[in-house]
Each structure stands twice: as C-alpha cells, then as structure tokens.
Image (tube, helix red, strand yellow):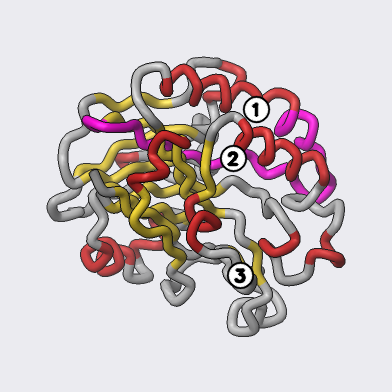
Amino acid sequence: MKIVSWNVNGFRSILGKGFQEVLANSGADVFCLQEIKARQDQVLCDFGPYTCHWNSAVRPGYSGTATLSRSAPLSVSAGIGEAEHDSEGRVLTTEFADFYVVNVYVPNVGRELKRLDYRVSAWGPAFVNFLKRLEQKKPVVVCGDLNVAHNEIDLARPKANVGNAGFTDEERTDFSKFLDAGFVDSFRHFEKGPGHYTWWSYQNSARPRNIGWRIDYACVSASLTLALQEAFIWPDVQGSDHCPVGVVLGD
C-alpha cells in the first residue's frame, strides 16, 4: 500500500495549483492532507476513484485534516476522543485490514512559543496514548505534519534555529519519546544523509536554495518495519510551502 501525506496549506487554494493532477499521478492508495482550512461543503469537486473523509476544525479557515482513500476503509474516526484536543480537527484515523492510518497535524507552538507547554505536556502524551490504544488492535501508520525537526540533520540551519518553534529542546525530546514508544521514522530508516526537507519559508528564496526543514513524516509501528519497502519526499511538487512525503508498505 502506498500512503502519501501533504500539508496543503489550504485545500481550496491547492485545488487551483494542480492538486488533482498530483493526486492522479501519485499512485497513492491513501492520501492524507493537513491544514485544509475548509469544511466539506466548501470543497466541491471530483476526486475520481478516491473518497474524501473529513475532520474540519470548529474554527473556520483553520487547521483540519482530510484523508482520500481509493478503497473504502473499515472505519473512519475523527479526533483522539478527548474534547481538550479535538476541536481543531488535527487527527483523522482510517482503518484498513492490516493497520490504521492516522493522519495528524500536530500543533505549532508559535513564534513566541505560547503553545509549547500545551504541545509537549498535554497534546504529546495524549496523542501517544491514543496511538498505543490503537496498537492493541493492529499496527499504526502515522502520517502528517509533526511540526518538529528532530535532529540537526533535519534542517538546513540548525545553529541559527536552536530554541525556535519546531526546534526547541522540548519538542525534540517529545519526538524522541514518540519514537521510543515504538514508532519508526520511515524516511530515516532508509536515508541517513542531509539535505532532505519538507517545508521551506516563502521568504528569501528558501525553497530554490533548499534552506528547509524536515517536519513532515511517515512513521510506522515497529512491527511494520519489515513491511517497509520505500519512504520518500517529493520536493519538486509545488503548490504549498510543504511538499508531499510518504511510504510504501508490502505484505
């Protein structure tokens, strides 16, 4: 199964920038979108063989996730079952025969780190607990914008960004705890080298110069490691300040 994930920075915006062509050419069985900033009734278009499942934020034009699937999931659920965390549409889970696909848009702590405590003390533990509950039934694939560069290799200018949103010690430690809970960063399972990023600032020609951050991930339960066939980043796909990432799983 091929799973693709993309923070599109606005579902309605991306539709005018070639999204349907990207979707058609992706070969994806499941395509996860984050930061959709829209409700279902605001996105009226044909996705061909895909069915679109939604978890929009209560606040208009903010956050939200959507998952397009080629075959019908066994079940679809929105959120993690905790009201404190579920109003922003950040988690959408689709169940398939062999695993769950969890589409997630992790909260950004903000320039002034105002949501840092919430992100690492409340959201992080609650999300991992949710994933571990799912794992009691079957393995999990976690795809999305995790809003953290884990190690120095995961951003072009680490020294200049120490302590900034997405590269604080607290966020990086929280991501380490997530991996220690039994999840594998699929891209780093295959690729150990630098220069691979998934988000670039719109300022200072950052993308053409490849001054970016790797903050979008496809992670899997450790029990799926042997099924990993490929993990990828598609930096040439335009339309958002993020690019798609994904993973291919075999039997």
Q: How far, Cα to Cα, is label 1 from label 2?
A: 8 Å
> Is there CB contact under 8 Å for labels 1 and 2?
yes
Q: Does residue 4 sit above or below 129 in this rendering? A: below
Dot 1: what SS? Answer: helix
Residue 148 x/y as whole percent = 67, 49
| 121 or 57: nearer the viewer | 121
Magenta region: which residues? 96-120
The circle on residue 193 is 3
Q: Which mark is residue 106?
A: 2
Which residue is rendered at x = 26% and y = 32% of the image?
A: 98
Q: Who comes first in sequence, dot 1 or dot 3? A: 1
Residue under the image location 79 percent in, 30 percent down? 117
- 244 lies left or right of 193: left
Q: Position of residue 129 (x, y in %)?
A: 56, 20
Residue 202 image offset from top left, x and y in percent: 64, 72
- Where residue 77 appears, as percent x and y from the top left, is 35, 24
Could you tell me which quadrant the C terminus lies in?
Answer: top left
Residue 149 vs residue 32, the one in the foreground:
149
Q: Amino acid at mark 2?
A: Val
Please name which of the two marks, 1 or 3, marks the residue nearer to the observer. 3
Give 131 or 243, whichever is nearer the viewer.
Answer: 131
- When the figure is inspected, residue 85 is found, relative to residue 245, above or below; the finding is above
Q: Is residue 76 left or right of residue 154?
A: left
SS label for mark 3: loop
